[in-house]
Image (tube, rainbow, N blue to C red):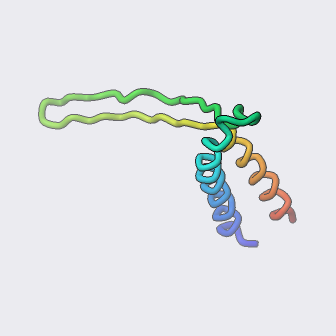
Amino acid sequence: MGPWKKSFYWLASIIISIVVGNALAPTFSGTAFSWLAQSANFGFDPIAFNLTVVKFSFGLMFTVNACQAAIFVICAIVYYFINRD
């Protein structure tokens, strides 16, 4: 398998884990698996630079829940077994 296909599959697995984990997490909030809906925020708040003529703002914030992390681990294991040489 070519290196670009491996990169594409890895990127697709990351995107799938983010989307599916974000969609499934609210369904677990009232069940015995409510720990899957727990999330953590990390990053830094926006910083504004005002140069009178132009104003720049820079910031980055991530929110990750346990369901996303669990699906990502599953995707990483599947990716490993699919791409073994």
Image quarter of the N terminus = bottom right
- Dividing the picture into quadrants, the one containing residue 11 is bottom right
Residue farthest bottom in this picture: 1
Q: Given the current orientation, which residue lies at the most extreme front position?
A: 30
Q: In the rendered view, does 32 fall on the left or right side of 39?
A: right
x, y percentage for residue 39? Answer: 61, 32
Q: Position of residue 33 (x, y in %)?
A: 75, 36
Q: Is residue 73 left or right of residue 51?
A: right
Residue at coordinates 65% horizontally, 68% vertically from top-left?
Answer: 4
Which of the image's four quarters has the C terminus?
bottom right
Relative depth, front residue between 7 and 28: 28
Look at 47% across and 34% down and name the residue there.
61
In-front residue for pair 59/31: 31
Percent position of residue 29, x then y: 65, 36
User: Is 81 drawn above or below residue 32 in the view shown?
Assistant: below
In the picture as drawn, the residue positioned furthest to the left comes out as 53
Residue 31 at x, y = what percent? 72, 36
Residue appearing at x 67%, y 57% in the figure: 13
Q: Is residue 53 left or right of residue 66?
A: left
> What residue is rendered at 12% in x and 35% in y?
53
